[in-house]
Structures are given as structure tokens and as C-alpha cells.
Amino acid sequence: MAWFRLFACGEDFPVVLDGDVVIAGFYTTRYVEAPTQGEAEAIASELIFEDPDLEPPPGYDDFQPRLVFEEVEQVAEPVDIDGNFSFFPMDEDEEDY
């Protein structure tokens, strides 16, 4: 099996930030061990969607968030990272960034 580094972008996730429900996007990196890139993406996707920080608040279960792996790279070994999310608001124009 090989190690893969996956840089993911999530969009339209209802999350609680500073006590308020917001529709947010995020970036995060995950390292997974898998036999193929496709299986690495499936494993990382499952890990991200099951993360308690992304659990939808009550009343937001019908949202259809999206997850895209912007970079997938086979690496020799994982790097020790915190696995946190860097959130950004989804309601701002890209020009505002």
C-alpha cells in the first residue's frame, strides 16, 4: 500500500462557527494509506464527512455539501499535521478574497 496526501476543498457545509450556523467552505489536508489513488480519495472523503466538526446542526440535514480533492499526491510517508479545517464563508464574492 502507498501513502497519499489529499488536499480537499469543501463547499456549502452548514457548520457552527462562533455560536452561529453559517454555510461555509473549507480547505483541509489528509494523509491516507491505500492501494490506489481512487481508494485514497474514497477513504479521505469518508473520514472528512464523518468528522464531528462537520456534523450538520439540527434542521440542516438536507444540505448537499460538496467535496473536491484539488491535489492528490503519492508520498513516501505522512507528515504530522493537525487535520483541522480552514473555513471560509460561501456567501462572499470571490473578488472579495
Image: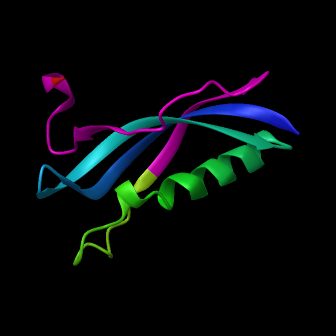
Identify the image quadrant of the C terminus: top left
Residue 38 x, y percent position in the rendering: 75, 46
Check if residue 22 falls in the magenta segment. no
Q: Residue at x 47, y 33 (%)?
A: 82
Quarter assignment of residue 64: bottom left
Observer-nearest of 83 and 41: 83
The quarter of the picture where residue 16 lies is bottom left
Residue 61 place in picture, x, y as percent: 32, 75
Q: Is residue 90 above or below residue 73?
A: below
User: Is residue 35 rendered to the left or right of residue 70?
Assistant: right
Q: Is residue 12 above or below residue 73?
A: below
Q: Is residue 25 above or below residue 60?
A: above
Residue located 22% across and 44% down the image = 90
- Give the residue displayed 43% in from the left and 53% down from the top: 66
Instruction: Indicate the position of residue 33 as horizontal and vertical percent values.
Output: 77, 41
Quadrant where the image shows the N terminus: top right
Instruction: Answer with left or right where residue 64 lies relative to residue 32.
Output: left
Q: Please state the total of marks drawn on the protein image.
A: 0
Residue at 25% of width from left, 69% of height from top?
A: 57
Membership of 72 in magenta stretch: yes
Indicate the position of residue 2 as horizontal and vertical percent values: 84, 34
Q: Which residues are magenta?
A: 67-96
Figure coloring: rainbow
